Amino acid sequence: MSIDTSATGTARKATMETLTPDHRATDVRLESLLAELTLEEKVQLLTGRDFWTTWPLEKIGLRRMLFSDGPTGVRGEVWDEREPSMNFPSAAAISSSWDPAIADRLGAASAVEARRKGVDVVLGPTINLHRSPLGGRHFEAFSEDPVLTAELAAAYVSGVQRNGVGATPKHYIANDSETDRFTVDVKVDERPLRELYLLAFEKAIVESKAWLVMSSYNSINGATATENDLLETPLNTEWGFDGVVISDWTAVRSINSANASQDLAMPGPAGPWGAALVVAVKSGDVAETAIDRKVLRILQLAARVGALEGFGAVQAEPADREDPIAFAREASAAGTVMVKNDGVLPLDVPSVRKAGLKSGGKSVAVIGHNARYARTQGGGSATVVPEKIVTPLDGIRAAFGPDNVSYSVGAVVQEGIAELPLEQITNPVTGTPGVRVRFLDANGEELFAEDRRSTALVWFGGDAPIEASSTVQFHTLYTPAETGPVKLGFSTVGHGRIFVDGVLTREATIEATGTDLGAAFLAPPSASVEIQATAGVQLQVRIELDTADREGALSNALAITIGVEADNADPDALIHDAVEAARAAEIAVVVVGTNSRVESEGYDRTTLELPGLQDRLVHAVAAANPRTIVIVNSGSPVLLPWRDEVAATLIGYFGGQEFGNALTDILTGASEPGGRLPTTWPATQEDVPVINVTPAEDGTLTYDEGIHIGYRAWLRAGTTPAYEFGYGLGYTDWSLDIVDAPATAEPGTAVPLTVTLTNTGTRAGKNVVQVYAEKPGSAVDRPVRWLVASTPVWAGPGETVTAVLDAPTRLLAYWDNGWTYEPGDYTLRIGTSVTDLPLETTLTLTDISQEGAA
């Protein structure tokens, strides 16, 4: 029997209850402002003014609204190292905390950052599901499970909007991989669409009442997202969404989308709407009432963020403030997952220091490219420029003393060009660290110049006259740190020249690879030339890039990295040196990870293997030193073929700018490794039950696995992964003692569960109580088990604590033209991972015959 619970009936009721007389008065005032606008003015408001802002309209007191990428850091209007941003841990790290409070605090901290930068709307959170581990952008999303994702997304949205900034759950909907993301048509049945992909979004809309939702690039079952009926149902009609549907950048492609519930097309000022939409309205192809609804929603957003005169912002100043650096450090530790520990951790700092001094060697051998050049965030539009990054090497040196720590690169991970270190470049005009950038016209006359403090530069909005220029010139004095050959080059798309000491050394035209606009812009190929460098001897470096005749959506944007390629001429020697350092040390810490060519917006992965010779490196180091600790610096699952050979393994993800300090806190025991896996980590790529991200020749990508993704698919296949969903170790031991739950429940209610557990170890610690449901003998296809509730808990040594959870019976329902409840017995299993479930209870779901019960 089909029962309408938290869909149409309940959501509409909840929405009506929030429409106080003051809200209704606000609606009337907005309608009066709407009545003052001409059709042309209304249509203008529906397309952005530029890359990041909306149109102001002085006659009704409307200022511009500024949007910013911001899932785990708010960049602001310009992509500029001179205006740095906080770099928080990636969403995958945040979700590994399994702690909505952490997600809420991230949202609040992001809103504070937004207000500091004049940003009205944060374009996040990203809450698409980790359907396949090959998904290139999974670092930016939370989990393979819709319930865990929904909890964290809702908490993040609440934290942002409580502080007066709009949040934007994205990308709606089924945008779970990057290959052909602009054109792919995702074929997905109604049941998995509802039970997985829409469920991940629902709580952020219904409970946290997000002010915006971003529509995605892809099509869903034949209709592109910006023209899809899913924008109206369930988003508006069932969930009571009253906010703005903003497009992903360039996702609106035709006038047809104006007839859908798509409200705002970004970026601007050009686009498919504009004057053509005015004509469509006048001809009757688009109803003016549809335009009015869109405008009212944009005006309401402006009122909420304080961009409309006469309307008080929801929150004039941020209500929640905390030290963002301290929070970034805490959040990174909370999301770090320890998947192995044979007792080597936590390290005793005094004894390790003493061992190093006693042996005459270094007490800690730090090894790995990512130890020194850590990835604190994934590639793509979510990238921010932090003021300072603490790498694992920085953190370990600070904890153990630089004299007790050695460093070896071990294996090169970098692909392409890495920017020049600021301490090695001098601006020839100012004499200060940095580079001089000049925009020149066709006659070589200077149009614009600026002094920058980085050689990894992006113009994505701002004042630089890219379209008006013919050439951009980059000039710096580079002082190499070592003597020998150096591969100097640049990474961009276009025609460029490299001059060293006034001599043209390389000229090249770099073509974009693939068709993805974002990948071509943010991760382009490179060109380089080998030069002979002498340590301490300055080289005059000038790069010229032709910018005339640039066309397309990014004609007024530019990205370039100037720097050097990594030296990988003798990989055997790099491994040998690392092994010798490990053999001489008390502890070996190897940091392995991915690079920007592996995990980024715009493309998916082709393999789960670590790039380069990192696996070979770990095998060799572990053989030389039995006290080898590995830190995994990747945004999503990678293969760990050496996992049984090392003493301990920590998954640190992209841990944000305090990554190194957070890791050191865990290594020394100052912090608990608080994470549990939000996504299954496979032992081999062949084992992964759902992996395809490549559309067929007809452009379709079929989700033929239905409701079985992530751990559900693993359980169904009966294959054992390296580390299962929900798994993670701490520094203490626990026992799960008792579960208390009612024997029966009605559809549409929540089942209260009380779980008693005891910290049986000698240290304070954290655990995550997880509740999974099973339906033996179900009349429909069901997962083996599925998550229905979870909560983090903390306890001192020997302390018994009680965890209280609510499991909504809605999560026991399945979709069949409505949420359908199957009466009878359900088994609720309680434990600390999807397979470690020592407690259970039986719940009988009663039969309700009347329709519309809540």
Image (cartoon, grey):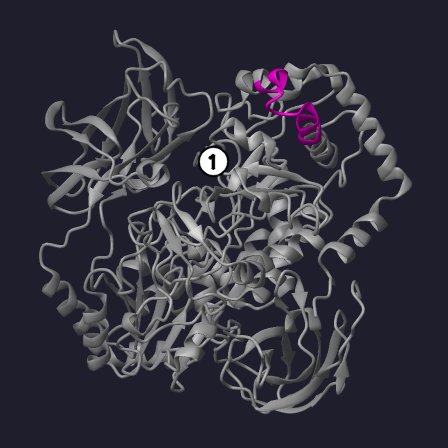
User: Where in the figure is residue 729, as x and y percent of width and height?
Assistant: 48, 80
- Does any portion of residue 799 appear in the rendered image? no
Type of amino acid at the residue the image marks with label 1: Ala
State whether the magenta stretch is mostly helix, strand or loop: helix
Q: Quadrant of residue 754?
A: bottom right
Task: Tell me the quadrant of the picture where the N terminus can be found.
Answer: bottom right
Q: Residue at x 62, y 51 (%)?
A: 107
Horizontal arrangement in the rendering, residue 332 relative to residue 479 (left or right): right
* In the image, residue 810 above or below residue 692: below
Q: Quadrant of residue 542?
A: top left
Horizontal arrangement in the rendering, residue 259 relative to residue 657 (left or right): right
Secondary structure under tag 1 reads loop
Horizontal arrangement in the rendering, residue 228 relative to residue 572 (left or right): right
User: Where in the figure is residue 638, as x and y percent of width and height?
Assistant: 33, 66
Q: Which residue is mark 1?
A: 251
Horizontal arrangement in the rendering, residue 569 relative to residue 825 (left or right): left
Q: Quadrant of residue 607?
A: bottom left
* In the image, residue 226 above or below residue 596: above
The range drawn in magenta is 280-294
- Crowding at dot 1, Cα within 10 Å, few <14 / some 14-19 / many 20+, comes out as many
- Does any portion of residue 148 appear in the rendered image? yes
Q: Residue at x 66, y 41 (%)?
A: 165
Most foreground residue, 131 or 592: 131
Q: Residue at x 68, y 40 (%)?
A: 243
Which residue occupies the extreme right position in the image?
21
